[in-house]
Image: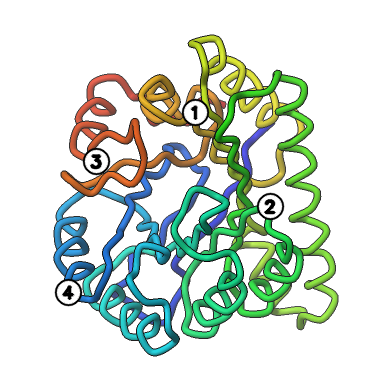
Amino acid sequence: MEQMTIRLGDTSDPSITPATIGRNRAAIICPLQGPDASSLVASARRIAQTACDVVEWRVDTLASTEEAVLKGALQVVRRELKVPLLATARTSTEGGALPAEELDRVVTVLLEAGVDAIDIEASAETAGDLIDRAFGADTVVVLSAHDFTGTTGVETLLDEFTAMQQRLLDHAASASQTMSEDKREEWAERGWGIVKIATTPVDPMDIYKLMVAGRRFVDTVATVPIIAISMGQLGQLTRTYPGALGSAATFAASPGEESAPGQISVESLSEFHAQTGCLNLNR
C-alpha cells in the first residue's frame, strides 16, 4: 500500500522551502530548543547550516511561556529558519518541562501566531479540542503517543496506530464540514495529519516489535504518514533506518542540540544515507 504524504510549509513567503513528509525519503526533523530568544537565534543559525527538512521547536524549553515571549520567540525563529516549523509544547507528564495546566494556553497562542504543524499528545485531557483548534487554524497535527516504560506487542502497537489514525481522521472529517470547497480540496491535497508513536526498548527485540508494527501498518491500512521511534541509545536503529519500518520522518540534531537520547547528528545521518540509502522509504 502506498504511503500517504503530507506537505508542510505552504506559505505566501517564497523563502520558506516546503517539505513533503512521506515521499521517497524519510524527512529529517531537527530539534530547536533554548530558554530565550538569543539562545534560539544561536541554535537556529547552527541548524540552518544542516540538511534538515523540518525544525521541531521545543517550546517547553523556554524559560517563560508568556504570550509576548512566545510570539517574540516565534518571530526570531521564523527570521532565522527557512524550513517548515513543527511546534511541540511537551508537558512534564509527557517528558517535557511545561506545566500541564499551561498546555491549552500555550498551544492556543502558537496556533494564533502561526506555525506549520503542532504536536498534540494523544493522552492529553484536552487533545480532542486542541486537534479541532489546529484544523481551525489551518495547522497540520502530529498526533503523538509516548511510552516511557516499555514497548508493547506488535498487535497492540498496530491497534494503537490504527486508533490514532482514525481519531485524527474523525476530527478531520468533522472540521471539513465547515470548510469551503476550496479549503477542503487544499487540505485533501496537503494531507490530514501525521501519527507518531515513540516507545522505550527494554531489550533489542522491542526495537523489532516497533519496526514490524510500523511496516505492517504502512503496508496495509495507513492513510496518513507515520513517525515511529524506539527511544534511547538502544533504539538508535529506528532513527537510522526509518524507511525500513515505514516511518516518514526521523529526528537528528545539529552538534550539541540533541533533544533526546539516541539522536545522531544531521551530518552523520546524511553521510550514512549517501552510503546506504538508509532514509529511502521502502514501498
- In front here: 90 or 157? 90
Sequence-wise, the earlier of marks 2 and 1 is 2
Per the rendering, the mark at residue 230 is 1
Within 10 Å of disc 1 (Cα), the crowding (few <14, some 14-19, many 20+) is: many
Element at label 2: loop
Point 67% across, 59% down: residue: 192
Give the Cα separation between the discs numbered 2 and 4.
Answer: 32 Å
Task: Residue type at mark 3: give it.
Answer: Val
How is the model colour-coded? rainbow
Point 58% across, 49% down: residue: 5
Task: Specify the farthest residue to the bottom.
Answer: 68
Within 10 Å of disc 2 (Cα), the crowding (few <14, some 14-19, many 20+) is: many
**x then y, percent, for residue 162:** 77, 38
Element at label 1: strand
Element at label 3: helix
Per the rendering, the mark at residue 273 is none
Give the Cα separation between the discs numbered 3 and 4.
Answer: 23 Å
**x then y, percent, for residue 66:** 42, 84
Q: Nearer the viewer, mark 2 or mark 3?
A: 2
Which quadrant is home to the N terminus?
Answer: top right
Per the rendering, the mark at residue 122 is 2
Left-right relation of 37 to 118: left
Point 71% across, 44% down: residue: 223
Residue position for label 4: 38
Sequence-wise, the earlier of marks 1 and 4 is 4
- In front here: 192 or 209? 209
Sequence-wise, the earlier of marks 3 and 4 is 4
Residue position for label 3: 266
Sequence-wise, the earlier of marks 1 and 3 is 1
- In front here: 139 or 206? 206
Give the Cα separation between the discs numbered 2 and 3.
Answer: 28 Å
Task: Residue type at mark 2: give it.
Answer: Ala
